[in-house]
Image (tube, rainbow, N blue to C red):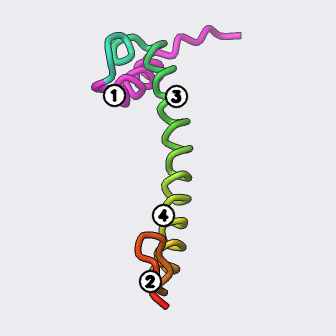
């Protein structure tokens, strides 16, 4: 089986990870292994928080519609 050294492919892959960690603290933006871990962690948080943002927006919309109907805890209605 021929030997594979991955010249430009390897460099491109590493550069891609290091570009995505620009601005990260210490070795997370310098070393490939640390950058790879930091990117994986950041992507997990980004995925989770995109869903959380939608969840919060949906809840705010639901509470906003009931608030516009006149039901409010801060200002009780006089009967």
Q: Which of marks 3 and 4 precedes in the sequence? A: 3
Asked if residue 79 is positioned above or below residue 30 in the image, the reply reads below
The quadrant holding residue 32 is: top left
- The residue beneath circle 1 is 19
- The residue beneath circle 4 is 57
Q: Main secondary structure of the magenta part?
A: helix
The quadrant holding residue 15 is: top left
Q: Nearer the viewer, residue 14 or 62?
A: 62
Check if mark 3's residue and mark 1's residue have beta carbons within 8 Å: no
Rendered image: mark on residue 68: 2
What residue do we see at 42% from left, 70% from top?
74
Magenta stretch: includes residue 14: yes
Rendered image: mark on residue 41: 3
Q: Position of residue 72 (x, y in %)?
A: 47, 76
The N terminus - image quarter: top right
Check if mark 2's residue and mark 3's residue have beta carbons within 8 Å: no
């Amino acid at each position: 089986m021929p030997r594979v050294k991955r010249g430009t492919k390897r460099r491109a892959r590493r550069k891609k990870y290091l570009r995505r960690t620009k601005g990260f603290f210490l070795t997370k933006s310098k070393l490939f292994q640390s950058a790879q871990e930091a990117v994986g962690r950041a992507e997990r948080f980004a995925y989770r928080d995109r869903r959380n943002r939608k969840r919060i927006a949906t809840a705010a919309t639901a509470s906003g519609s009931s608030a516009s109907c006149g039901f409010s805890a801060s200002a009780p209605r006089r009967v």
